[in-house]
Structures are given as structure tokens and as C-alpha cells.
Image: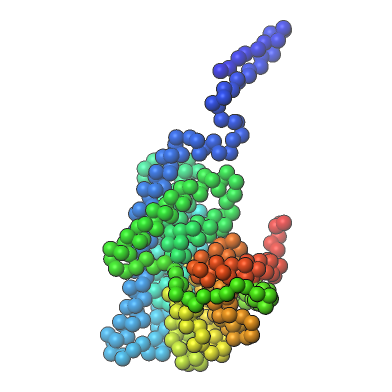
Amino acid sequence: MTTVRRDSSDQNVSVHKQTTPTDPPANDPLAPLRDRRYLGLLALAGILGVPISAVAYGFLKLVSTTQKWIFTDLPVTLGFRAQPLWWPVPTLAVAGILVALAIRYLPGTGGASPADGFTTHGAPAPAELPGIAIAALATLCFGAVLGPEAPLIAIGGGLAAYAVRLARRDPPARVSAVLAAAGGFAAISTLLGSPLIAAFLLMEAVGLAGATLELVLLPGLLAAGIGSLIFIGLGSWTGFGTFSLAIPNLPPVGQPNVAEFGWALVIGVAAALIGSAIRLLGLRMRSPVERRLLWATPLVGLIIAGLAIAYAQGSGRDTAEVLFSGQDALGPLIAHGAGYSLGALLLLLACKGLAYGASLSSFRGGPVFPAMFLGAVGGIAMSHLPGLPLVAGAAMGIGAMSAAMLKLPMTSVLMATLLLLTDGLATMPLVIVAVAVAYVTTVRLTPARVGST
């Protein structure tokens, strides 16, 4: 209700709006949640979670099937008894050619460069989605050391934003942003073993807080929950599994002791030093590769292949431990870590770390899984020294290296603890210390950008 008051001269007019008890406060940050239109936004997020998670499941299945065909079936088809030692050379050269062509000639440069870390860049345009998918498939299927999470988030966000534009011409920017974020939630809902980890990963990467967190979190969690159900249902229906990271059946660990807390400090500093060196390698290599893209990217692929071959020759193990993201190899590594010699672990850490840095400079994918795998390798290597159990070392290594490479401390703690189930809960205090030390040390080692505070 509005009242008009005039002064005695009748020259000044003031208008006062009288509020009623049912009117929301003028500066209420949660007012959009009480709007009926927000319920429609939640419903739309849930609906979009179904096809986007199905697309993500199909993408991961295509990657898994193509990897098996390239590295297992094709050598046998060509007459070899098994994969020859030199096999990564042609495969990674082809990967470099395909990725370079996608970056140079397709819209969107194949997605964001992973050398910049795990950052979000908004939903890509529909025309950019084919280039992102092709560059990611070439990277993941042919053996480069990156993971699927970043391209899946981009594809999920792009599909959600495109669906909104199809349903409504010129939708509000906030609606498009919220649903694009929900599409990213749905796309990686079970990739990290739990929709909760996926939610924290995206929220911490974007830097959501306050009322904005409330607005984005609910549609995102709803889409992630529905996406998890779709992943589980398709995995059961097809028999292919959920393609999610889980590490069950590990030996139990006891309560942390003083010696293990001391190792948490050491692991945190070591992860910061190694992670900073890997990231610096990727950034330093990126500029010269981008200037000579069409031949430099295949050359980087050959370097990665050479590192995998060197590890296989030096350790007697499979080149696959250096190649790929490490998502499938992480569980077996921790479960059978006691069977690795200290020399093999150190050689694996060096070769995969260098291959990871080279992949960051040139290929397209996510940095999460290689960081987790390298952290586990380093923690298991340190467990050969007195006072550090293997599982505790692996847990601290996963958390610390993730914090060093991603600069997302909360997500790093969650990944290291939830993925190890009951062992992760027992080692959580150690992981928190290792992550905190790694994060602070990494920030201090990172040069401040001009204009930053």
C-alpha cells in the first residue's frame, strides 16, 4: 500500500511504501528461494540431470571401450601376441595430431588448457562442444596423462545452457548460469565416487559463498543426485559399471600417532614442491607448443610415450602405469603397493610426473586424477621409511598433491578421506594436516599476480 504526503507549500511530494508482514525484506538475499519460479528452476535442473548424466555415462563408456581397443585388441589384430613395448609411440603421436587439429580448426580451442589448474570458465557455446569432445577423446583414449572431469563439466554445462536457450529465448543470465552449473554437477556426479565430492569440487572451484551458494547448490545437488541414480541404473542395466572411483577392501589402519603427524608435515611440503614443479613445467612448455601447435603437440606425445617406455624398461612393469589419468590404476596401486620396490615407485613418480606436466601443456583434460595418483605413489614410497603405514601415507599423499595441483583444500581433504572409506575416516586428521601444509606452501611458492592482494 502506498501513501502520498504533501507539505504545507504543496511543492514537495514524498512517497512512502508501507510494508505488510508478508512482504519479504528489501535486502533479503534468500528472497529468490521463496519465489515460485525457483521451484520451476529446481524441477528443470532435475529434468536436465537425466539426459546429461546419460551423455556423460556414454562418454566414459566410449573412452573405456576405445582405450581397450587401441591398447589391447588392436595389437593382437595386427599379429602381435601382446602390446609391444613401443606401442605408445604411434598412439600418442596420433593423439597429438588429433588434439592439435581440434585446437587449431574447431571453435573453442578444444576447451580450457589444464595448465591453468582446475578452474571454471562458464558454459561453452553449442558450436564449441564438438571440439571439446574430440580433443578430450583423443587425449583420454590414446594415453595422455589427464582425466575426464574437466571436459565432462564443460559438456554438461554447455548442454544444459543450450537446453535452456531452446526452451526460452533470451533467458535471464542467472537462470542460464545456475542450470549450466547443475549440468556440470550431473556430468561428474559419481565420477569421484560420490556426488558430494563432485559438489564440493565445483563449489570450491567457482568460489561460491553466501546467498549465491544457496541459489546454485540446491539445483546442483538435485542434478547430481539424479545423475548418480542414472549412472547406477545404467551401470546395472548394461553391466559396464558406474565408472566411478572407489577403493574398497583396504587393510585397516589404527589411530594416528605423533610420528604420523610428523610425516604429514613432510608429505605436505614434498607435495607442494613436486606439484609446483609439475605445474611450472606445464606452463613453461605451453607457450612454445602453442606457437608451433601442429607439430609440437605430436612431439609432446612422443615425449610422454618415451617416459612410459623408460619406466617399463626400468621397472619391468606396464607402460599403462605412466599413461592415462590413473583413475583405474589408483585402487590396484594402493591395494598392492607393498609389492612395489622403492626404486620402482620413485621411477614411477618421476616418469608420470614429467608426463603429467607435458600433458598439461599440450592436451585437453582434467588435472584431478593424475594428481591423486602421483600423491598416492609418493605416499607409498615414503611408507618404506620407518613410522609411516602404507595406507596412511597414500591418503596423505592423495590429499596433499591434490591441494598442491588444484589449490582446493576442502575438496582435497574430502577426496582423500571419502574414497578410502573407513580407512579414510581414520586418517582424516593426518590428511587435514598434510593438505593444510601443502596448500600454504604451494601458495607461498606461487608468484603473486600483478594487482592481486
Q: Nearer the viewer, residue 146 or 346?
A: 346
170 to 254, vertically: above or below: above
Q: Position of residue 339 (x, y in %)?
A: 49, 88
76 to 365, vertically: above or below: below
Relative side of 154 to 444, left or right? left
Q: How many marks?
A: 0
State the image quarter where residue 170 is shown.
top left
* Residue 283 visible here: no
Q: Position of residue 328 (x, y in %)?
A: 43, 75
State the scheme by which the image is colored: rainbow
* Residue 201 visible here: yes
Residue at figure coordinates x 72%, y 7% from the top left: 9
Q: Quadrant of the C terminus?
A: bottom right
36 to 255, vertically: above or below: above
Q: Quadrant of the N terminus?
A: top right
Q: Position of residue 392 (x, y in %)?
A: 57, 75
Q: Residue furthest front?
A: 254
399 to 318, vertically: above or below: above
Q: Nearer the viewer, residue 422 or 344?
A: 422
Residue at figure coordinates x 36%, y 72% from the top left: 64
Q: Position of residue 275 (x, y in %)?
A: 61, 74
State the image quarter where residue 40 is shown.
top left
State the image quarter where residue 190 is shown.
bottom left
Residue at figure coordinates x 30%, y 82% from the top left: 73
Residue at figure coordinates x 42%, y 54% from the top left: 225
